[in-house]
Amino acid sequence: MNAASNFVGPTDSSKTPRFAGIATFALLPQLRDVPHADVVVVGVPFDAGVSYRPGARFGPAHIREASRLLRPYNPVQDIEPFATQQVVDAGDISANPFNIDEAVAQIEDGARHLTETGARLVTLGGDHTIALPLLRNVARTHGPVAVIHFDAHLDTWDTYFGAPVTHGTPFRRASEEGLIDLTASWHIGTRGPLYGREDLRDDERLGFAIIGSHEFETESLASIIARLHARIAGKPVYVSVDIDVLDPAHAPGTGTPEAGGLTSRELLAIIRSLSTVNLVGADVVEVAPAYDHAQVTAVAASHVAYELISAMAPRS
Ligand SMILES: N=C(N)NCCCC(=O)O
Ligand SMILES: [Zn+2]
Ligand SMILES: [Zn+2]
């Protein structure tokens, strides 16, 4: 227990070495150790929806391992994100690795169960397929949400090999199902070659506006953040961070890397700006440790999750 807080915080790394013991996210308590949770970190070790390099099923464990080094005070935000709300690690949702439809149903069920008492989820993937059942879960409570989708890719493609539910299609399915607010959703950091011009036409019709990675060259971060906020104003917001939004220099450990991406500094700054919005849930996906080096990608992902949790924290 943190002396100044009613909430159970992380293990004190000045008393127990942070490299000892089982890695929960940020060395936080487990769900079963507290009577109530406001924010639940949960893993979804599922990657049967990938179109290229596999391995994101190992993402949750890899992010947790790198998150041992996170500390309780966030100086840029001047808050202690684990002392003003109860944050816990709920372990992993078990999802069938051989059956995408069953996995997607299991993920939605797991998410529903964890959010029944009003907690918000920060989900660690897993490939981007998992955003579909997570959006189904938030839309059941909040109606269509403004999605801020950080990704090199659009992920609004239709099918791969005839399969409608993959890591390249979650936001098309979500749009068709009425889960997203068509007037308030964004892709941020999009880049790289597409299949054709119609990808962009379809994407616009499905409700997304785009701030491409190349726009960060000529427009200030402050201006980009202002544009982002203007479109989501007043809406419930769901944030989906595909770690491949970062340049491969900042996040090599991912399945479909594209050159010319955001820096981790840019991404963290945009997420910090979301402390003023009604953030109803978030995910960090596509971390694939087999292609990572020195935890570079996992460190970035753990800080992204930390800033998302900070953005959710009540301000005094
Ligand atoms: N969601 C991620 N990371 N990638 C989607 C790439 C889809 C494709 O192979 O065209
Ligand atoms: Zn991507
Ligand atoms: Zn993606």
Image: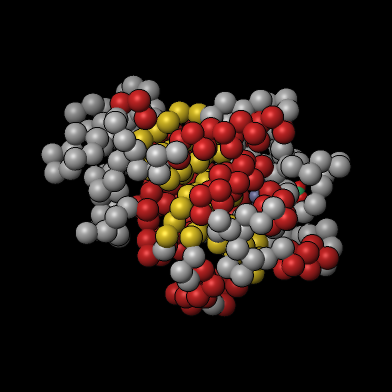
Going by the image, does 207 lie left or right of 230?
A: right
Tell me how many marks there are: 0
In the rendered image, residue 135, in percent from the top left (x then y), is placed at 59, 48
Going by the image, does 23 lie left or right of 73?
A: right
In the rendered image, residue 180, in percent from the top left (x then y), is placed at 61, 58
Answer yes or no: is residue 26 visible: no
Residue at image point 52% right, 38% down: 112
- Which quadrant is home to the C terminus? bottom left
Residue at image point 73% right, 42% down: 166
Along the line of sight, which residue is nearer the eye, 185 or 12? Answer: 185
Residue at image point 40% right, 44% down: 118
In the rendered image, residue 169, in percent from the top left (x then y), is placed at 73, 49
Residue at image point 29% right, 31% down: 35
Answer yes or no: is residue 127 visible: yes
- Which quadrant is home to the N terminus? top left
In the rendered image, residue 170, in percent from the top left (x then y), is placed at 68, 49
Question: Looking at the rendering, which quadrant does residue 4 occupy?
Answer: top left
